[in-house]
Amino acid sequence: MKKTKLVLIASFVLILLNSCKEDSIAKKSILEKIETQYSQLYDSATTKFDDNLFLPKTIKDNKLRLVSSYEWTSGFYPGSLWYLYELTKDSKWKDRALAYTKKLDTIQYWEGNHDVGFIIECSYGNAIKDTPSKDFDKIIVQTAKSLSTRFRPRAGIIQSWKKSSKWDCPVIIDNMMNLELLFHATKISGDSTYYNIAVSHADTTIKNHFRKDYSTYHVLDYDRETGGIVAKKTAQGYSDESAWARGQAWGLYGYTVCYRETKYPKYLEQAIKIADYLINHKNLPNDKIPYWDYDVPVEKDTPRDASAASITASALYELGHFTKDNKQLYLSFADEIMKSLNSPDYFAEEGTNKGFLLKHSVGSIPHGVEIDVPLNYADYYYLEALYRSKNLK
């Protein structure tokens, strides 16, 4: 009997070791693919580099499309390089990340766009984690100061787009993603102004932006003088009352960050409700990669949005560690998303996709742009999710 037990234990240990070895090989394979792709993307971007257009965003007309530092997605490429360094610890990725990050320094003074939080937090915010710098700290704080000029006290929100014939004071759910910069600036400077603006925006968004089922509108138009709501609309979703996929992911991620930075239970509750809405949605495909809008009529060729999936996965990996009751559910769901994104259905074959990692993302179908293409923010949140998954395990 004793000998039988020893044999069983030895067999179990062997199975466990083989399983760990296979998992290690799989992870190594993914990292090798990522490095191959991003080496190609880096070479292509640097070959076409000029002072105005130098950051890879997507593919257009089968050509690599580069954007300037003043395009809202400019921080995602240097951010991806930072995560690639964290995943591989190869110093060449750090050098490249630092070089591209420093090209965005003038953004700190830009008051004309709410997405400076995206741009600077994904680049300089990641740089600070590895390379602490007083100069970088100053850039974070100055950027927060610039973003704060867009705060409208009577409405309690940060204005997104500028006033136009269509909007008075539009606020998009995407803006939740810019609050992390404000929290960061308060930690650096000790000035609570930025923290208070972030909390005001988050509270007002909970109050006005979400429906009873915890799906979110894309755009709310406020009266900047009275703070009243003029209209609830969409710009990139299927309809005003539909759940635009990337918007739902922005909301989930944004409130997870708000809870991390404040520990206010209301933000954790909001993130949990949004997560449950997404996980249990009747129109979510079996592979967990959503259609571009959760409410769009589904046909054979209805586009998926890998960017919404990668944002969701990254948020769930963090959210899972803030809740005991749903921890395993959220982590397992994120794992399922990543399994799909790592599959040939979504992860580009080596040497294709102009070097981008993920296929099948959507920018804006109503505007007819970036439909079923790679996008730099899909890659960024995929790499962040991979990094978080690796660290959690």
Image (spheres, rainbow, N blue to C red):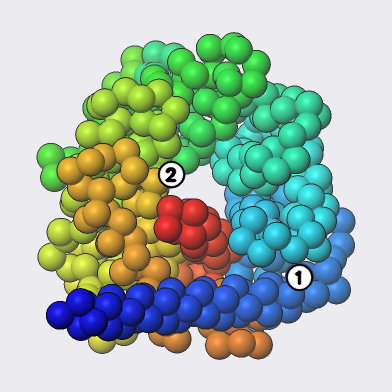
Question: Is the residue marked by circle 1 packed among few (<14), some (14-19), or many (20+) residues within 10 Å?
Answer: some
Q: Please tell me in which quadrant of the rendered image residue 10 appears.
A: bottom left
Badge 2 amino acid: Asp
Q: Please tell me in which quadrant of the rendered image residue 356 appears.
A: bottom right
Q: Nearer the viewer, residue 261 or 103?
A: 261
Residue at 39 percent of width and 13 percent of height: 154
The residue where tag 2 is placed is: 174
Q: Earlier in the sequence, mark 2 or mark 1?
A: 1
Distance (Cα) linking label 2 and label 1: 28 Å
Question: Is the residue marked by circle 2 packed among few (<14), some (14-19), or many (20+) residues within 10 Å?
Answer: many
Residue at 49 percent of width and 54 percent of height: 391
Instruction: Tell me if residue 61 comes above or below residue 162 in the rendering.
Output: below
Q: Position of residue 205 (x, y in %)?
A: 32, 31
Under tag 2, what secondary structure? helix
Q: Is residue 271 left or right of residue 156?
A: left
Under tag 1, what secondary structure? helix
* Image quadrant where one finds the N terminus: bottom left
Residue at 57 percent of width and 28 percent of height: 184
**Contact (Cβ within 8 Å) of mark 2 with mark 1:** no
Look at the image and tell me whether residue 183 can be seen.
yes
Q: Position of residue 301 (x, y in %)?
A: 31, 84
Q: Position of residue 351 (x, y in %)?
A: 65, 87
Instruction: Tell me if residue 104 comes above or below residue 108 in the rendering.
Output: below
Instruction: Tell me if residue 105 comes above or below residue 379 in the rendering.
Output: above
Look at the image and tell me whether residue 48 can be seen.
no
Residue at 40 percent of width and 23 percent of height: 262
Q: Nearer the viewer, residue 228 or 386?
A: 386
Q: Nearer the viewer, residue 295 or 6?
A: 6
The residue where tag 1 is placed is: 42
Looking at this view, name the residue that lies furthest to the front: 2
Badge 1 amino acid: Tyr
